[in-house]
Amino acid sequence: MHGLMQAYYQQSTVDKKYLELAILMVSRLNRCHYCVVHHTPPALNYGVTAAQLQAIEDGSWREGKLFDPVEQAVLRFAEQMNTRQGRIDDSLFAELSQTFDRGQIVELTVRAGMCEFFNRFNEALQLDIEPVAESLFTQSAAG
C-alpha cells in the first residue's frame, strides 16, 4: 500500500497541491492529527496557504474566497468520498471533469481512499507523532 502511495506521489498527474488539499480534508474529517501533522508542511510547499489550512481545520473552507473553484471542487470531492461512502454528486463529478481527465480523477479517488485507510490505521494503532514531524509541523504553523 505504501509503495502505491509513493508511486502516485512521484509520478502524479495531478498537481500535488490538489492531492494535499484532498488528504488534509479527509484527515480533518477523520480527526487524524497524525496525518494532518505529516501533510501540513508539504501542503505549504505545494502552495496551500496558512489561511487555507486554517479554513480546512476549522471547517470554514466553504466561506469567502480563499479557494478557487477547482480547489473548492477537490475539497467537496474529498468530503463526499468521506461522508457519503464514496458516492459523488453527478454535478460535482461533471465539475471535476472540466479540469481533470479520467485518469486524474482516478488518482484523486485513490489518494483520498488511501488517506481514509491510513487515517484509520494510524488512529487505531495510536501512533505517536515523530519528533521531527512535530517540529516541522510546528515550524510551518508558526510561519
Image (cartoon, helix red, strand yellow):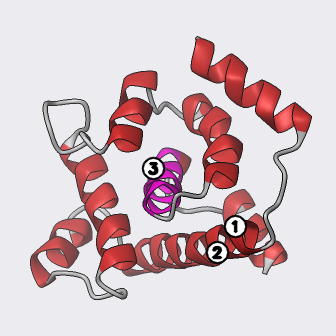
Q: Is residue 111 left or right of residue 137?
A: left
Q: Residues within 10 Å of mark 1 (few under 14, many from 20)?
A: some
Q: Amino acid at mark 1?
A: Glu
Q: Quadrant for the C terminus, please.
A: top right
Q: Name the residue carrying label 3.
A: 21
> Looking at the image, which residue is at 28% across and 88% down?
87
> How far is mark 1 from mark 3, CA to CA?
20 Å
Q: How many marks?
A: 3
Element on which disc 1 rests: helix
For badge 3, the amino acid type reads Leu
Q: Main secondary structure of the magenta part?
A: helix
Q: Which residues are magenta?
A: 17-29
Q: Which secondary structure lies at badge 3?
A: helix
Marks 2/3: CA distance?
A: 18 Å
User: Who's the residue at 63% across and 50% down the image?
Assistant: 33
**Place of residue 9 in the rendered image (x, y in percent of width and height, measured from the top left):** 69, 60
When the figure is inspected, residue 17 is found, relative to residue 10, above or below; the finding is above
For disc 1, the marked residue is: 123
Residue extending farthest to the right is: 131
Name the front one of labels 1 and 3.
1
Residue most toward the top? Answer: 143
Going by the numbered disc 2, the residue's amino acid type is Arg
Pinpoint residue 64: horizontal percent, then vertical percent: 13, 31
Name the residue carrying label 2: 120
Residue for point 89% across, 33% down: 132
Q: Residues within 10 Å of mark 3 (few under 14, many from 20)?
A: many
**Front-lying residue, 60 or 11:** 60
Residue 30 covered by magenta stretch: no
Question: Is there CB contact under 8 Å for labels 2 and 1?
Answer: yes
Q: Answer with left or right where residue 76 lies relative to residue 65.
A: right
